[in-house]
Image (cartoon, rainbow, N blue to C red):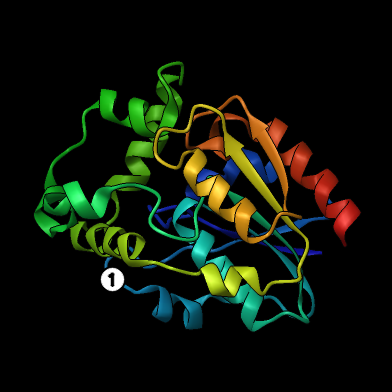
Amino acid sequence: MNTLLLPGMDGTGTLFGRFASCLDPRWVPHVVSYSRDEPSSYDELLDRVPLPSGRFVLIAESFSGPLAIRLAARHPERVGALVLVATFVTNPSRLAAWGRPWLRDAAFRMRLPDVALRFGLLGFDASEEELVAVREAIETIAPHVLAKRLREIVAVDVREAFRGLLVPTLYVAGRRDRLVGRRARAEIGALRPEVSVVELDAPHLVLQRKPRESASAISRFLSAAT
């Protein structure tokens, strides 16, 4: 079945490589990428995601979780299953209260040090190759585009759309995730207690750090759900 992969905040889709190659062949990956230089709201992205024909499943990480939820709500007869990875239905942090300077374009013109990427995204045990791949993905995106995506995260609220979904859903969490923690997962569980949960020993970038383990868990879920 066609499997739509929606990327995290970088929006490039380039970080799905190892995970996509580990998926069971029954789940044919279609990697979505967003514009690198044109800022878009969730509303605008909702109309721009290229959908495969017929039925399909959705796998969405981080930034794209709310978008996948809205796509599933818009196409209930076509979405066979939904997989949410390290994501949220409302702002997952206190960013709106203490991080307003980071919502401006200028904040994303600064080069993040390696320690910040390891602390927030990759974990301190990530390889140099993994670090370079993430940095390259982020640095190809215009600063004003990243700032717009962060503002979208701060304002997002898809609780009602998520509560109304009937599609089989899996939530994949990183046990060491410092960006999207247990509060976001608890909120999802409170809205839909039937959602399946898999927790892996990973930081925020679960699919990138644990591609084989996450692909195995997701493939098993999709086989049972569709």
Residue visible at 71% across and 54% down in the picture: 193
Specify the amino acid type for callout 1: Pro
Residue visible at 33% across and 37% down in the picture: 135
Residue visible at 60% across and 24% down in the picture: 201
Left-right relation of 220 to 200: right
Left-right relation of 201 to 127: right
Q: Nearer the viewer, residue 180 or 60?
A: 180
Regarding residue 65, the answer to whether it shows in the image is: yes
Task: State the residue lying farthest toward the top.
Answer: 125
Q: Nearer the viewer, residue 169 or 222?
A: 169
Residue visible at 77% across and 39% down in the picture: 217
Regarding residue 24, the answer to whether it shows in the image is: no
Residue under pointer 1: 39
- Position in image of residue 79 (x %, y %): 74, 72
Circle 1 Cα neighbour tier, 10 Å, few/some/many (<14 / 14–19 / ≥20): some
Q: How many marks?
A: 1
- Position in image of residue 222 (x %, y %): 82, 54
Left-right relation of 214 to 54: left
- Position in image of residue 149 (x %, y %): 32, 62
Task: State the residue lying farthest toward the front.
Answer: 190
The image shows residue 183, relative to residue 200, as above or below, that is below
- Position in image of residue 85 (x %, y %): 58, 48
